[in-house]
Image (cartoon, rainbow, N blue to C red):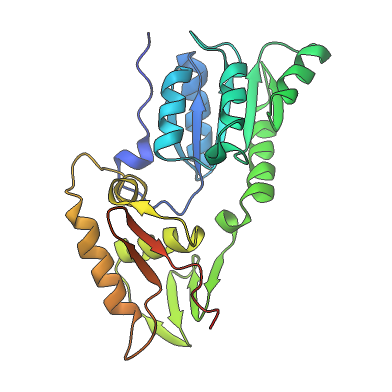
Amino acid sequence: MNEPIVQTALREGKSDRAPRILVVEDEVPLATLLVYNLEAEGYQVEHVDNGDEAELRIAESPPDLVLLDWMLPGVSGLEICRRLRARDIARDMPIIMLTARGEEAERVRGLSVGADDYVVKPFSTPELMARVRALLRRARPERVASKLTLGDIDLDRETRRVRRSGREIHLGPTEFRLLEYFMEKPGRVFTRAQLLDSVWGMSAEIDERTVDVHVGRLRKALIRGREKDPIRTVRGSGYSFDETFGRD
């Protein structure tokens, strides 16, 4: 079996501010083309070449969108799509099926198991990129918004500035990425391993205690006096941005 293409953006430790896309495709030339064009659009991209590995990656760290080939070795893409839709973690995840099957009955079959869109090979790359953008806008508008606001905290992705109650908060690049990641998914608890994978992109090379250090720095920068701590520590699990923050 061909070795999957390594996720370039994660390997280089880039920010997770861009939507993450998982490409599930066993044809290396096509996978290479997809990864290249998606990264050129600014997305973080990961590639696997079989359904079992795709299920594992999605369970560990759900992407924002999946490009899923119909004809995969072992378990078919159709079956993988059906399995994903049965899980809470992937029930609303955008899935685009890639296939050489162009008959109407096959398209209906793909959509019936939960695919959001269906692209027939050979396809137009600009059209595929447009479909990816459209699905991401519809499913995860917070991933494409230039500003995030929760309670009295405002984060501007374009200017890379953070303010709380109008005062500017000075954050280092890592603390900015941490806050951004937390604010995208308020209430969701992330393990230290998940934060390392998504924010640092090199979980195998950095000790998990690094997360505690940077969360501590983020808290110190955000909190003045008796202000409420927006980050919740979940004992035995990890960290979360308090979904009740700002409701008082």
> As displayed, is residue 233 above or below residue 191?
below
> As displayed, is residue 151 above or below residue 25?
below
Name, please, the residue furthest toward the front. Answer: 235
> As displayed, is residue 68 above or below residue 105?
below
Name, please, the residue furthest toward the right. Answer: 104
Foreground of the two, 187 or 176: 187
The quarter of the image holding the N terminus is top left
Left or right of 216 on screen, residue 122: right
Count of numbered circles in the view: 0
**Which residue corresponds to the image point at 37% horizontal and 77% vertical from the top-left?**
229
**Which residue corresponds to the image point at 56% horizontal and 40% vertical from the top-left?**
88
Foreground of the two, 114 or 31: 114
Left or right of 222 on screen, residue 93: right
Q: Residue 193, percent across and down?
A: 29, 46
Q: Residue 89, percent across and down?
A: 52, 40
Which quadrant of the structure image shows residue 115?
Answer: top right
> As displayed, is residue 118 above or below residue 147?
above
Which quadrant of the structure image shows residue 128?
Answer: top right
**Which residue corresponds to the image point at 64% horizontal and 24% vertical from the top-left?**
97
Q: Residue 38, percent across and down?
A: 52, 36
Left or right of 241 on screen, residue 90: right
Foreground of the two, 32 or 206: 206
**Which residue corresponds to the image point at 48% horizontal and 50% vertical from the top-left?**
18
